Amino acid sequence: MKYTETETDKVLDKLIKSTRSPRGQYSAAESYKLLENRLTRKSKRVLPLRIWRTVTSVAAITLICIAGWYTYEYLTPVEMQTINTLANRTEVTLPDGSQIMLNHYSSLTYPKRFKGDSREVTLNGEGYFNITKNPDKPFIVTAEMMKVQVLGTQFNIDAYRNNPNVRTTLIEGSVMVSIDSTNEQIILQPSESAIYNKENKTLELAVEDETTTVAWQNNSFIFNKQTLQEIARKLGNSFGVVIEIDNNDLANYRLTAKFNNNESLEEILTLLQTGRGFTFTKINHQKIIISKN
C-alpha cells in the first residue's frame, strides 16, 4: 500500500504514540519501511541546508582571516636593519633576491620584508646594485638627497658623506635619477652618470668609463686622468682616513695609475708621489696631509 507524505507522517505519529504495534498494517517491518522513507525525505531537505550553512561559515571565516592578514600587513611596521661594512666589503642579499655589494665604510638600511607598492633602501657610502626585476614594485635607493628608481638593472652609487658629489653610474638597463629639492630628473643609459653637486645643488649628466667606476669590486683602484683631489677622496673613503691636500694647484694635478686593493695606503701614496713633486705626511691614524715639495 502506498502512502502520501501526509499519511506517512500520521502513521509515524501513531507509532510514536503507540505502546504496541499491532500486526498487519502497523507491523514492525512495514513501520520500519515507512520510518526509513520519512527519514530519507527529511534528510534530503535538511542536508543541503546544513551544507550551505557550513560552506558560508567557512567562507566567512576565510574572508575574515584574509582581511585580518591584510590589515596586519598594512598596519604593522616593518623592522628595519642596517648593514655596516667598516674596513671590509660586504655582499647583501635583500628579501626580493636583489644583491648589493657594499664598499668599505658604507652602510645600507633596508626592511626585513618589502611591503606596499615599492622596494626602498637607503645607502650611505658606495654600493653596486644588481636588482631583481619586478615591474609592479619599483626599487628606490635614497642616497642623501638623490633618489634612484629602477625596475631591474645594475648600477653603482657613490655617496660618501664627505664627497662633494653624489654619483650614480648605470652599468646595465635604465634608471631614473631625481633630486627632491629641485624636482630635477635624469634618465640614464648604460655608461652614463648622474652627478649631483652638493654645494652648487646642480645635477649633471656625464659619460664615464664604467670599468674605472666599478674597479673596487675587483680589489683594484683605477685612476684615469683623475685629479689628485679625486684620488685622495677615493683612497680616504676606502681606507677610512681623511687625506687633505694643502695646495690648490696640487689638488688639481691629474694622474693615471692602477693599484691592487691589497696594497696598503702608504704603499699607494709612496708610488704616487714618486717623481711628481709632492709628499705625504701621516699626522695620525685618521689623517694624512699631502704637500707640494
Image (tube, helix red, strand yellow):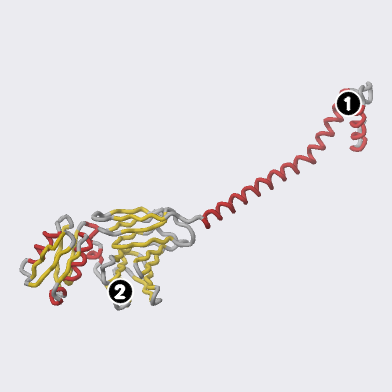
Quarter of the image for residue 283 reads bottom left
- Foreground: 60 or 97? 60
User: In which image quadrant can residue 26 be found?
Assistant: top right
Element assignment for label 1: helix
* 55 up-or-down from 178: above or below: above
Return the disc, 2 or 1, that comes first in the chain's sequence: 1
Q: In the image as oriented, which residue stretches furthest toward the front?
A: 284
**Left or right: 174, with 49 as reference point:** left
Q: How crowded is mark 1: few (under 14 residues within 10 Å), some or many (20 or more)?
A: some
Q: Nearer the viewer, mark 2 or mark 1?
A: 2
Q: Name the residue under label 2.
A: 198
**What is the three-letter code of the residue carrying label 1?**
Glu
Quadrant in the picture for residue 213: bottom left
Please name the residue shown 91% across and 28% down the image.
17
Q: Position of residue 78 (x, y in %)?
A: 46, 55
What is the quadrant of the C terminus in the image? bottom left
Q: How many angstroms separate mark 2 from mark 1 (CA)?
A: 100 Å
Q: Which amino acid does label 2 sit on?
A: Lys
Kindly identify which residue carries mark 1: 30
Q: Is residue 269 left or right of residue 151?
A: left
Residue 160, above or below 182: above
For residue 225, say whether it is visible: no
